[in-house]
Amino acid sequence: MNLPPHCEASAFYTPDSKVKGFKVLEITGPAYPALSYNRRDFYKIVLGTGNMHIYYGDQTFDITGTFLFFANPYIPYSSEHRSPEQKGFACLFTKDFIGSRDRTERLLNSPLFRFDGTPVIPVSSEQAAFIEVLYRQMLSVYSGDYDEKDEMLRSCIDLIMHEALRILPQNGAKQRNAASRITYLFMDLLEKQFPIEVATDPLKLRTAQDFADQLAVHVNYLNRSVKEVTGKPISVHIAERITAEAKALLQHTNWSIGDIGYSLGFDYPSYFNNYFKRVTGASPNSFRKSIGKV
């Protein structure tokens, strides 16, 4: 679901805004043209109804009906409407608006916003009705004069996220401890490198040792902590994220294979070709042809 262009601008949280770092709006009427496939500097939660494709990272979601969409500022996304009308609600907010460290950690570690999580969730009419009440409450609070409106808006965001997590299949809550905190820091560093927007500025952190040096911890401790919390070693997380970004660049840019490889830290196109084929089973060129982009 595409918002009016002025609502997608980073200036939505300027000092003259009603609430710094936050905006909520109801969306009705004609579908706006797709904005550029790019990263933003804010999180976005949409309750929408429509017929569309959502492109998120290297994933494509085919949507018909009512859904929740959770957009992470580090992951590029856009949508393509197949119907002329759209309706729903959206709230946009920055990490600074969320406030406390605990809330920020919960946000970044949530499967709703992680790059390997579930950003699109179909909802029933009953679930949509409950979430719509929360959006209308946010609209009322946002335009009102209540002194604690920031905290009330955060509470509404929390309730929407909890409802979405209730809808999702549960894998069991992970206890937050030292391992989960260092894992959060690792995942945050990894995500901040993406999306790649300039082919001449290659990734700086590509190995477990690179991340350990950046976080000032022993590489064995970092790898053990990440595997304990996520079930996967650091090397797998890095490989999955690089591969996801490679697929997105192959699909959504006209960069050469060599430029894409260089931007991802491969000095030679042959190194990137061999890596991509080993991980995906197809060469970068074959992958581009398979998605109809030549």
Image: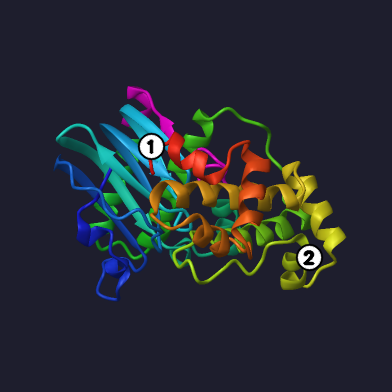
Name the one closer to the observer, 32 or 21. 32
Name the one closer to the observer, 146 or 250. 250
Secondary structure of the residue carrying numbered label 2: helix
Q: Is residue 279 above or below residue 220?
A: above
Q: Is residue 48 above or below residue 106?
A: above
Name the one closer to the observer, 232 or 144. 232
Few, some or many C-alpha atoms within 10 Å of disc 2 (few <14, some 14-19, many ≥20)? some
Magenta segment main secondary structure: loop
Label annotation for residue 166: none
Q: Amino acid at mark 1?
A: Gly
Residue 118 included in the magenta stretch of the image? yes
Secondary structure of the residue carrying numbered label 1: loop
Q: Is residue 113 left or right of residue 47?
A: right
Q: Position of residue 291 (x, y in %)?
A: 42, 36
**For the magenta stretch, what is the residue range?**
110-129
Q: Amino acid at mark 2?
A: Gln
Q: Position of residue 203 (x, y in %)?
A: 60, 66
Residue at x 34% of width, y 29% of height: 63
Quarter where residue 144 is shown: bottom left
Q: Is residue 139 left or right of residue 188?
A: left
- Residue that carries the numbered disc 1 in the rendered image: 292
Residue at x 50% of width, y 62% of height: 259
Closer to the camera: disc 2 or disc 1? 1
- Residue that carries the numbered disc 2 in the rendered image: 209
Residue 252 seen in the current view: yes
Q: Position of residue 82 (x, y in %)?
A: 22, 32
Distance CA(mark 2)–CA(mark 1)? 38 Å
Residue 175 seen in the current view: no
Residue 288 included in the magenta stretch of the image? no
Residue at x 84% of width, y 52% of height: 224
